[in-house]
Amino acid sequence: MTPVELDRNLAAHKIPPLLFLFGEETFSLERTLQRVLDLAVPPDTRDFNYNLYHGRESRAETILDTVRTLPLFAAHRMVLVKDAQNLAAAELEAFVPYLQHPMPETVLVFTADKIDRRKKFFQEFNKKGELVEYKKLYDNQIPAFVKSQAHEAGRSFTEDALALFCRRMGTNLQEVHGELSKLFAYLGERNLADVKDVAAVVSDTRVDSIFDLTNAMGDKNTGEALRLLSRLLAEGVAPLLILSMMVRHFRQLWKTRELLEQGTGKQDLCRRIGINPYFLDGLVKQARRFSSVQYRHSFELFLDVDMALKSSGAHPAVLLEKLVQDIAVGEPG
């Protein structure tokens, strides 16, 4: 079962009696967990019908005793086992008989950061229960998440404001949610967020400057790129971080160039590159400024600078300045 399918079931008040939520994307996982609890056990009966255990501290025997206890003054009991990856293999094995014959009155939920589907526990769980994985979102999935959160709050973004917000945020949904809360509070009674609102609330000038630097390099605007590089280094941004962002940008450009040569359409380009469609036209223009030979040469330069930065006695500013100039020229010497 996927998170979307589980959401549909919960919206229809259908709760699986055996549920295992796992994955790196903890924000969505925790929100789903709260929905399950709200549906399974009313707040006024939770003292009697809700039990929380932690994998490292708990024994299967104790948990199973609780799981087999009928709910009191309610239709369901919910038993939650957090951090189930910390349960020993033998402890997990002890749940197998129950998994084969679960009690309909009990909702047994496990959470973990990862699972091993080869284990008998998970093979049995998958027969009677639901394993639901919460994967981290890609960059190009963040705009849809932001719009969804805004819609729930009765808010919306202009197109440019949404692009700026997503550019300044990463893929950590907890942080995205926190910044959205700050932005909506800043808006007050207004429902539409524009660029000025986002710039006032969600500020990350260093990240913006790195993006500006890589864009200047992609545009072959050497003077602007050198100015931004000097500013970033003066502000204390790590040279290896700057280099990694350069590599990331030129990897996107090279991939874009290859896909364009294969005749890939714009809609498919966004999906395969993993970017917000708002930035596609600019990326395409930059991608066409470099040939395949120039891209290969650029990555040879990146590798040389990476090794030099990690060696003793390297002068980061000199190395990065020369890199910017060499990439602007674009041809092997």
Image: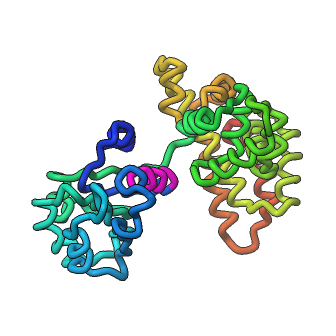
Which quarter of the figure is the C terminus placed in?
top right
Residue 259, image x, y percentages: 50, 26
In the rendered structure, the answer to whether residue 18 lies left or right of residue 54 reads left
Q: Is residue 44 above or below residue 324?
A: below
In magenta, the rendered stretch is 27-37
Q: Is residue 204 visible?
A: yes
Q: Nearer the viewer, residue 112 or 156?
A: 156
Which quarter of the figure is the N terminus placed in?
top left
Give the colour scheme of this rendering. Answer: rainbow
Q: Nearer the viewer, residue 249 or 116?
A: 116
Residue 8, image x, y percentages: 36, 36
Q: Is residue 99 above or below residue 13?
A: below
Residue 328, image x, y percentages: 76, 37
Q: Is residue 208 visible?
A: no
Residue 54, image x, y percentages: 38, 75
**Location of residue 73 by image quarter:** bottom left
**Location of residue 283 by image quarter:** top right
Q: Is residue 266 above or below residue 143?
A: above
Identity of the residue drawn at 88% across and 53% down: 231
**Location of residue 55 by image quarter:** bottom left
Q: Nearer the viewer, residue 107 or 288?
A: 107
In the rendered structure, the answer to whether residue 27 lies left or right of residue 168 reads left
Q: Is residue 11 above or below residue 100?
A: above
Identity of the residue drawn at 33% across and 69% down: 84
Identity of the residue drawn at 22% across and 57% down: 105
In the rendered structure, the answer to whether residue 125 lies left or right of residue 202 reads left
Q: Main secondary structure of the magenta part?
A: helix
